[in-house]
Image: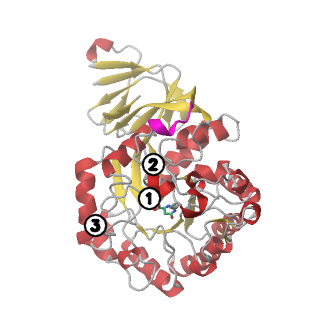
């Protein structure tokens, strides 16, 4: 049995200064007069906050198929280091999980190598092609967090409608990467001032929000639980805000980089290249408003690791994707909690509570009987982001060298310490 003393724990009523113990895989609140000699270990949590383990519903762990970019072992350890105890993995893999057979390959690797809970998404379309036939959603339903073709949008409305009907019958969410390919024209950064000035090909905002608009209509018709990935444009935020007012069954996520950076911050480096791209200052402002008024439900990282060679070809030729698991909490704490734009409780909603609610995962607070999936954080510790210290195989981040506040001290899954600083 392990005892944790003097920390602020996150309860259903907010933060309270209380001691607690971990017995097996459960939490027990400890009364003042219990003797320490009872316990195998005592951890002093003075100045620390103990919070439910974070949940990231959008990561790429690259196995099977692309282990040189990331493995389930390295990805899950990076997540633990970032304070996460559950992640959902995107299915742009080789083979893509489109049937029970292909999904099983991934499930076996997860079982063997993950140090946190890893829940995969199955694809929407066969081989995650975004066209043609649906995957074997029925066979996969019991083993997946939902269905997604992340990395690609589902191009035909009719096909998406069919997928939504099926997902609704299976009681699983559709998790949509909204991107209408007919608007792309070879673009790779936001179609804005920076693209114009530096002769880059831009990606217009319509490529995202037109598909958001199409899908919201289909959600209205089908009633499926619909979640939108990495929202990046002001138009999408407004569409989602209105849809929620109408009672449409929609939630969405954005990522720290869309809230902190915009296309004015772009540099000629692969570290700044991801899809969707960093948008304009106005888009960023709308996303922040969306997070603060509850239109945007959760923060995901879209942790998308690639090799050094794949990311070292400049803005135009590098692959899309940056890593995020090891920096997300610090960035959100620094830019939102420390600047008093939101409370720590609000950040916990965005990183732990809302994703659990939406994806039907057991809710966790630090209270008697709860599963001991938790994270010990210090809010004030200052450090500089250094990609060379990342345990992820991916090192590409636009935040390298940035001074941030907040540190994950320890992460526990099912009562076991899976990360310790
Ligand atoms: O930047 C991105 N990288 N966006 C995506 O949609 C896919 C992802 C990846 O898999 O690398």
Quadrant of the frame with the N terminus: top left
Quadrant in which residue 314 is drawn: bottom right
Residue position marked by numbered label 3 in the rendering: 103
Q: Nearer the viewer, mark 3 or mark 1?
A: 3
* Circle 3 residues within 10 Å: few <14, some 14–19, many ≥20: many
User: Is tag 3's residue or tag 2's residue first in the polypeptide sequence?
Assistant: 2
Judged by depth in the image, the label closer to the viewer, 3 or 2, is 3
Q: Quadrant of residue 168?
A: bottom left
Per the image, label 2 sits on a secondary structure element best described as strand
**Quick check: is 251 in the magenta stretch?**
no
Is the distance from the Cβ of mark 1 to the nearest ligand 1 atom less than 8 Å?
no
Mark pair 3, 2: CA separation:
21 Å
Residue plotted at (30% across, 19% down): 41
The residues tagged by marks 1 and 2 sit, at their Cα atoms, a distance apart of 10 Å
The residue beneath circle 1 is 359
**Which corner quadrant holds the C terminus?**
top left
Q: Position of residue 44 (x, y in %)?
A: 42, 18
Q: In this rendering, does residue 292 appear at all?
A: yes
Taking depth in this image into account, of 34 and 222 the one nearest to the observer is: 222
Distance, label 3 to label 1, CA atoms, is 19 Å
Residue at 48% across, 73% down: 224
Of the image marks 3 and 1, the number of the one nearer the N terminus: 3
The earlier-in-sequence mark between 1 and 2 is 2
| Magenta-drawn segment | 384-389
Residue where numbered disc 2 is placed: 55
Question: In the displayed structure, does residue 322 sit left or right of residue 343?
Answer: left
Label pair 1/2, CB-CB below 8 angstroms? yes
Task: Indicate the quadrant where residue 101 lies.
Answer: bottom left
- Mark 2 neighbour class, 10 Å CA radius: few under 14, some 14 to 19, many 20 or more: many
Residue 79 in picture, x, y percent from top left: 41, 44
78 or 187: nearer the viewer: 187
């Amino acid at each position: 049995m392990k005892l944790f003393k003097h920390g602020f724990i996150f309860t259903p009523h907010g933060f309270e200064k209380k001691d607690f113990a971990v017995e097996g895989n459960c939490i027990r609140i400890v009364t003042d007069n219990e003797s320490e000699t009872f316990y195998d270990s005592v951890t002093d949590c003075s100045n620390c906050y103990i919070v439910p383990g974070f949940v990231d519903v959008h990561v790429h762990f690259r196995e099977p198929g692309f282990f040189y970019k990331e493995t389930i072992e390295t990805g899950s350890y990076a997540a633990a280091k970032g304070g996460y105890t559950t992640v959902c993995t995107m299915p742009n893999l080789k083979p893509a999980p489109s049937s029970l057979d292909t999904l099983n390959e991934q499930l076996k690797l997860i079982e063997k190598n993950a140090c946190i809970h890893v829940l995969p998404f199955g694809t929407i379309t066969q081989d995650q092609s975004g066209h043609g036939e649906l995957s074997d959603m029925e066979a996969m339903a019991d083993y997946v967090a939902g269905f997604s073709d992340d990395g690609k949008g589902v191009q035909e409305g009719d096909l998406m409608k069919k997928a939504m009907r099926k997902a609704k019958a299976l009681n699983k969410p559709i998790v949509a990467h909204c991107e209408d390919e007919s608007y792309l024209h070879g673009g790779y950064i936001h179609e804005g001032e920076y693209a114009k000035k530096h002769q880059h090909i831009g990606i217009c905002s319509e490529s995202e929000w037109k598909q958001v608009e199409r899908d919201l209509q289909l959600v209205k018709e089908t009633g499926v639980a619909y979640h939108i990935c990495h929202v990046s444009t002001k138009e999408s935020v407004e569409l989602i805000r209105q849809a929620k007012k109408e009672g449409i069954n929609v939630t969405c996520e954005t990522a720290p980089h869309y809230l902190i950076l915009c296309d004015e911050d772009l540099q000629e480096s692969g570290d700044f290249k991801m899809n969707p791209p960093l948008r304009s200052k106005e888009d960023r402002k709308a996303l922040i408003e969306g997070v603060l008024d509850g239109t945007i439900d959760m923060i995901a990282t879209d942790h998308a690791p690639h090799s050094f060679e794949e990311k070292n070809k400049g803005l135009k030729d590098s692959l899309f994707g940056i890593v995020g698991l090891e920096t997300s909490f610090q960035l959100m704490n620094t830019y939102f909690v420390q600047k008093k734009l939101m409370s720590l409780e609000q950040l916990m909603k965005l990183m732990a509570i809302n994703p659990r609610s939406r994806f039907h995962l057991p809710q966790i607070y630090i209270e008697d009987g709860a599963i001991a999936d938790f994270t010990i954080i210090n809010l004030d510790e200052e450090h500089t982001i250094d990609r060379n210290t990342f345990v992820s195989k991916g090192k590409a981040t636009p935040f390298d060298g940035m001074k941030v506040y907040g540190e994950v001290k320890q992460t526990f899954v099912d009562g076991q310490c899976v990360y310790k600083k």
